[in-house]
Amino acid sequence: MKSHKTFDESSSVRITVSSVMRIIGLAVLIIQLALLAAAAPVEIPDEIRVLDVDVQLRVVSLAANSIQLIFSIVNSGRETYRILDTPTSIMSELPYVARKFHLRNKNQGKPNPKFRGVRVAWDAESAIEAKRFTTLQPRDNVIATYELYDYYDFSESGSGTYTLTLPPYIELLDPSGRRFLARFSDQPKQDIQVDNPRFSAAKQKAPTYTFTSNATTYAFRQCNGREQIITAAANRATQLRNIAVQNLQPPSPWSPLAIRWFGAFDLFRERQIRYTYTQLSDNFAARYTYDCTCPSTFDQFFVYAYAYSGRTDIFLCPWFFNQPGIGVTSRATTLLHEATHIEISTEDYVYTRLICLILAWWSPRHAYMNASSYEYYAEDLAQLRFGSMIYGVLDMGRRAVVNWLHALVAYKCWWLQEGRLVML
């Protein structure tokens, strides 16, 4: 009979199959928890808050080439409201032309006028810390005046009747700084007559600096040595785009992550979301010109970047370079955000992860056209894929350890006895 030499029970060195499995299992559990945390549920309010705020519009034609829109915003309730000064808020005094109102041509055979202003990626958290919000106390009346021709170009749509509406939602702050999705109780939907419209002159472009690497030309304007940072962000944005395209190819199911950012399944919206990602460039670095001539006033209002629909220029502000290189609200996701504006003319209905989640729950028809929703979906998808890759590596390691142990047994070097390795 063979004698077996076993490790003493009191020995500090003991190799068991179960202990190895526990270590690997713990690592796998950590990865799984991280993946679950990435898609952790948030508290969705039972309803969208409706503010006792009336918005009235008066249209004034001062001259042949001027149409002024005068909005009167009145708090008719008993509660004080703090409304975040988002770029698209009608009460925001941010120093740039963001899309604060929408125009639709009532003549269905003609195009809508082209929006002339900027589409903005913006840091809401910093804006809140800086108290960039409008306080409306009971009976307060805020007047906001805008020149129609500063916002829209009628060169293709021409004279006619246009219906004006405001963005569907606003962002509300409570005294503790928590944000809510809200809307006004009464806001205008008014027809405007535009006769012999003033046509908008084309914007002049600044000189472009280009350099070539690996037979690909990248274009920058006055970026002063930050080209490599931008190129790295552009390459990461390309990866995010490619992962999203792969994940949305049929017959892929409408995943929980898609529900999280775009709402309940709808065949039309599913096709539009897939179309949006496929329309983004598969080479962000070469597709766009990166312009670092952002006005200083933009940076003071926490603008990461902005773009114009239909133009392949992405304007980067100093605030952009304060963002992390990867992760949520990174330089890469900002570029993807702006690319959806350029290629698809997405809107900036709402910002920030929490408010975008609420938008997807309550208004999927707006979520699928919201630029930030595409940004967050792509980044979360990439994080989940990265976590799954690590999970796969650990699982491969677990299998390798098991195979190694079985190989030792096969060569009669060790013996498995009640889960413990015993030396022959």
Image (cartoon, rainbow, N blue to C red):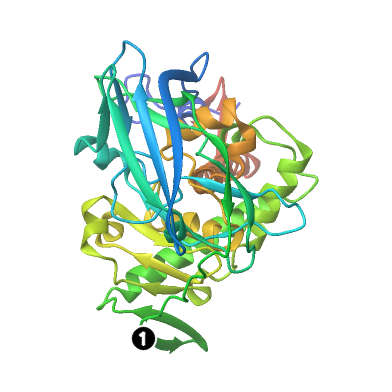
Give percent across and percent down for residue 136.
28, 24
Q: Nearer the viewer, residue 136 or 404?
A: 136
Image coords of residue 91 (percent x, y): 34, 38
Q: Residue at x 36, y 41 (%)?
A: 86
The residue lying at 37 percent from left, 33 percent from top is: 72
Q: At 56% from the left edge and 67% from the top edge, which residue is drawn? A: 310
Q: Give the percent coordinates (x, y) of residue 316.
A: 34, 65
Residue under label 1: 207
Q: How many marks?
A: 1
Taking depth in this image into account, of 420 and 197 the one nearest to the observer is: 197
Label 1 residue SS: loop
Residue 30 in sight here: no
The picture quadrant where one finds residue 114 is bottom right
Which quarter shows the N terminus?
top right
Image height check: is 420 above or below 290?
above
- Near mark 1 (Cα within 10 A), the count class, few <14, some 14-19 or many ≥20, is few
Instruction: Name the residue: 38% across, 56% down.
Output: 97
Which of the pair 201/115 is nearer the observer?
A: 201
Q: Farthest residue in the top direction?
A: 78
In the image, taking residue 301 as reference, residue 262 lies left or right, namely right
Q: Is residue 153 visible?
A: yes
Image: 146 above or below 3: below
Q: Is residue 156 above or below residue 173?
A: below
Closer to us: 327 or 101? 101
Judged left or right of residue 111, residue 120 is left
Type of amino acid under label 1: Pro
